[in-house]
Image: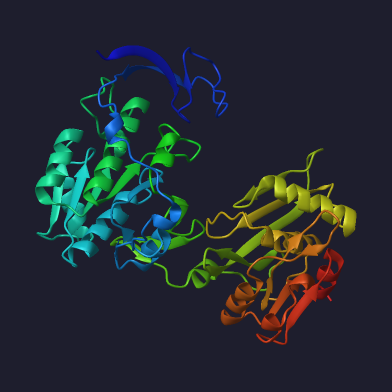
Amino acid sequence: MAKEKKIFFCTECGYESAKWMGQCPGCKGWNTFSEEKLVTSKKGSIKLSEKVEAKKITEVSETEEVRLYTHIEELDRVLGGGIVKGSLVLIGGDPGIGKSTLLLQMCASLVKDDVKVLYVSGEESLSQIMMRGKRLNAYSDSLMLLCDNDLDNIEAKIEKYSSEVVIIDSIQTISAQTVDNAPGTVTQVREVTSSLLRLAKTRNTAIFIVGHVTKDGQVAGPKTLEHMVDSVLYFEGDENEGVRLLRAAKNRFGSTNEIGVFSMTGEGLVEVKNPSQMFLSGRPENVPGSVVIATNEGSRSVLIELQALVCDSSFNMPRRTSVGVDYNRVNLLIAVLEKRAGIFLGGFDCYVNIAGGLKINDPASDLGIALAIVSSFKNRPIPSDMAIIGEMGLAGEIRGVSGAARRVSEALKMGYGKVIVPFSNKSKDIDSLSKDIIYVKNIGEAIAAVFQ
């Protein structure tokens, strides 16, 4: 007999508790616990004769990953080179960011290669998907659509059509009959995902599931959901900007540092082949506080514009604001400038912004942020043909960064003839790229090199 008991789940992170608590010990959220039924059963326990024996690592045969190419280069790059058969991929993002649009465009590309695709929607009607498919040129007899919320029926249709790729939009709307909870609850999401994972591995079918996100940008539901799937992709972007970024937070079949860059248009998502050119478009020339930095995103470098504004403060405590970069990191760099470079900003407001709506967490942007602040403070522009690379320490020293040669090469390719690089990154590879490489050891040398 199945035993039924009640348990409390945190709706933000999936933390389990036998009793209700005001604050979640896992994510520190307030009033996030909800009561749900938990059914446990001994049915399906493995017999002793059915247990799998362990093998020596030398006895395990190597199997080659079979991938399906979507022919959307930015998506294939983030996935690690294409869709791996039998994989379970979770895609999260804000409502209206373009998750369904990207997946429908992917389906349209796959069916052209005679790949059997099933698009399952629990939120939209078939006519809504059809109208969007016409707009995205995804109108094909080979693309199967299903509007259903029942997991058992979805599994039956996957078996019937022998689908190689399945889209579940979204996981929060699908329910399993074995669980007596409403769709979208922690127990339902976990049970449905577990069943889809089993289906993907046994049938060698690639399954994409769409997940809603919380106010903190995390996939809604239990945190174990991200551990169960093979890949976790986040679709990011500003509603007011046309740029969309697809970032891998987890990938068992590729790098987690890759990003895909898209532009949202009236005809759907368009790949951005040269992100540096897009992010630098519209950059003002000879304006104090504007600087170009090179950041590494996976296997490629991207040039972006960083802006800083320093002005007299009308408050007793000056304001510090940052958009796209870590707020605490900006405060730390301001403190280093005051202590090591004699740039006193105690009576000035400082604003730092990444143009284009991009968010970065690259230490190599430290020197660019510091020099942009100095440029605005001195009201002297940084040369328009100069790019900045370097991490700054608390002693004012400029530390080396990873992939320096790749960053310098991208800057030179985009027409930035002068590049400031940490002295510890000096090498023959970088010297062979250009004669106008400026090596600096500390913030004082960097300021002198820029504002000489």
- Tell me the residue at 62%/72% (across/down): 407
The answer to which quarter of the image holds residue 62 is: bottom left
The structure's colour scheme is rainbow
Say which of 360 and 346 sits in front. 360
Relative to 278, residue 436 above or below: below
* x then y, percent, for residue 335: 82, 50
* x then y, percent, for residue 338: 86, 53
Horizontal side of 296 relative to 137 (left or right) equals right
The answer to which quarter of the image holds residue 318 is: top right
Count all numbered tags in the image, as a single digit. 0
Relative to 181, residue 140 above or below: below
The answer to which quarter of the image holds residue 136 is: bottom left
Horizontal side of 37 relative to 284 (left or right) equals left
Quarter of the figure with the C terminus: bottom right
Residue 137 is at least partly visible in this image: no
- Tell me the residue at 43%/72% (across/down): 273
Residue 305 is at least partly visible in this image: yes
Quarter of the figure with the N terminus: top left
Horizontal side of 20 relative to 152 (left or right) equals right
* x then y, percent, for residue 329: 71, 49
Relative to 18, residue 27 above or below: below
Horizontal side of 201 relative to 289 (left or right) equals left
- Tell me the residue at 86%/66% (across/down): 444
* x then y, percent, for residue 54: 40, 44
Say which of 364 and 41 sits in front. 41
